[in-house]
Amino acid sequence: MKAKSIIARILLALAVTVAAAAACMKFDDSEIQGELSDIKSRLTALENKVNTNISSLWEIVNAQKNSITITSVSETDDSWIISFSNGKTATVSKGGTASTPVIGVKQDTDGIYYWTLYGGWLLDAGGKKLPVSGIPGVTPQLKIEGGYWYVSTDGGKTWTKLDKATGEDGDSFFKEVTWDEDYVYMTLQDGTKIVLRRGAGLVASIAAIPDYSDGSVKAGTSLFTIRFKVEPESAAESLLYLDTDCFKLSAAYTLTKAAAGDLATLPIYEMEANDGILTILTDGEALADEFAKGKLGVSAALFICDGETLSVNSGYFPLYPKNEYLGYEYVDLGLSVKWATINVGATKPEEFGDYFAWGETEPKSSYDWSTYKWCKDNFDALTKYCFDPSYWGGTGQMDNKSKLDLADDAANANMGGDWRMPTDSDWRELVNNCTVTWTDNYEGTGVAGSIFTGKKSGYTGVSIFIPAAGMRVDTATLDPGKYCFYWTSVLDMDREPSNACYFMSDESSTDINSYIRPEGRSVRAVCP
């Protein structure tokens, strides 16, 4: 028993010793794990590099298709960096030491570039060639999985297994990239050459898009926009990447004025390009006031020059005053129209201004049928604005016009822009939304008339003064200081279509009446 006990103790000791030795001999695989991590990192870097090259190849073909030019090209130790006139950048890797799936592009007989794989057409899931067009999201994608390359042609939904991936640098899709002062030449591995022009953009021409049939463009003495048609359309966006010093918007007076000078340069604040149209935001503050009032003509032209490859201009085109108010002051009473603060022909609110026969645009010395523009010396022989020639048994030329044309509107003819004579509805709107107060001495000027003060919320402190200018009959001025007589732009279709409507106010009332057209009455302008 004693011997057995000794043997048992010896075996136990041996077991403990072996276990301890095993514990001390734990396997160290850190070196292997490091190598695996390094391989994985290199595979990821290779995958990223290849997909970057694919995206860059798409940018290059898209640039050629859409007449986008190259603004700069540079070379590093491992790549070429290309910047385009649309603001995009392509990074093209130089060749490595390992074989990667050879993705390329090739132009088919239909003139379209398609993706290639190992020199053959790269086909989608339906067996069709994959065009190099559309958005980058439909370009081929490559990934490394399980040590092999995979390609997808449907945005990553399905993948096709290709060659084994080694994790080395990989071959470039490009054999070489060279350039001179005018062009950049890119040669793919299969020998395909892509040539792109250097410069700001392939702009063949620019032309102002007119707002009116006479070729003029709306302008003003504050902010306004001018639109230009760019040919080809694809080159318009490239202009946005030029330095602002490359643009000059010049304005020339067609009727010179010493006080204004013969030339002005309009600032360029913003530019946008869409569908071949370049839109420029500028400011006409530098233009003379006479232009705003339609008394001085101005033409403008856009010049674009980058000093190297681009020099083009729109040619001069006429500007038309856009500012609806054209420098004339107005009052906003919260109504559908804004009212001028002075009568047509006046310079101050208390001045009577000029008198006009209805449908005439110039004042005159005598107001009667014999001097009226739109008849043959008699009230029954109207030649315009004749709704019913038999009303007085006359021989008028019926044209069914019951409202003045702008050409015969005294407000528009004398003030321009969107100014016009008010309708009877405009006058009623003014009366219904204002408190009307008669005064015999407006602001100490000694002039009588009606003051219209706004009643609408937000406009209660706003008012305009309508002087009591009376009217002109033959050569006499009747009832000044007693009555406000102001023409509307419409005939009295409800009562006597041969008569024109006018607004009347005195110290006790306001009304819309109508009377014969040759009498001289005041005109107060409105603007929508």
Image (cartoon, rainbow, N blue to C red):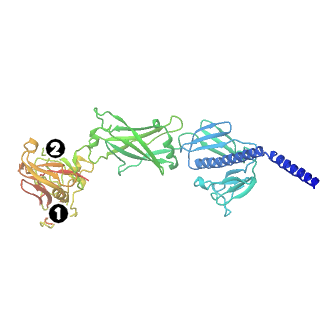
* Location of the N terminus (image quadrant): bottom right
Q: Which label is found at residue 190?
A: none
User: Quarter of the image holding residue 376?
Assistant: bottom left
In what element is the residue under mark 2? loop
Going by the numbered disc 2, the residue's amino acid type is: Ala
Crowd band around label 2 with a 10 angstrom C-alpha radius: few (<14), some (14–19), many (20+): some
Kind of residue sitting beneath label 1: Gly
Asked whether, in this view, residue 171 is left or right of residue 395, the answer is: right
Are the residues flagged by discs 2 and 1 in contact, CB closer than 8 Å? no
Q: Kindly indicate the quadrant of the structure image that contains residue 155.
A: bottom right
- Compared with residue 51, is residue 268 higher up or lower down, i.e. above or below? above
Residue 235 location (% of width, % of height) = 52, 46
398 sits to left or right of 218: left
Residue drawn 65% across and 43% down? Answer: 92
Q: CA distance from mark 2 to mark 1?
A: 35 Å
The residue closer to the viewer here, 431 or 248, is 431
Per the rendering, the mark at residue 396 is 1
184 in relation to 523, above or below: above
User: Taking 330 as reference, is 378 left or right?
Assistant: left
For the point 72% across and 55% down, the residue is: 120
Tag in front: 2 or 1: 2
Q: Residues within 10 Å of mark 1 (few under 14, many from 20)?
A: many
Q: Name the residue rendered at 26%, 41% in the picture.
A: 295
Q: Nearer the viewer, residue 246 or 215?
A: 246
92 vs 419, nearest the viewer = 92
Left or right: 299 as drawn, with respect to 501 = right
Farthest-out residue, front: 2
Residue 346 disc label? 2
- The relative height of residue 327 versus residue 15 in the rendered view (above or below) is above
Element type at marker 1? loop
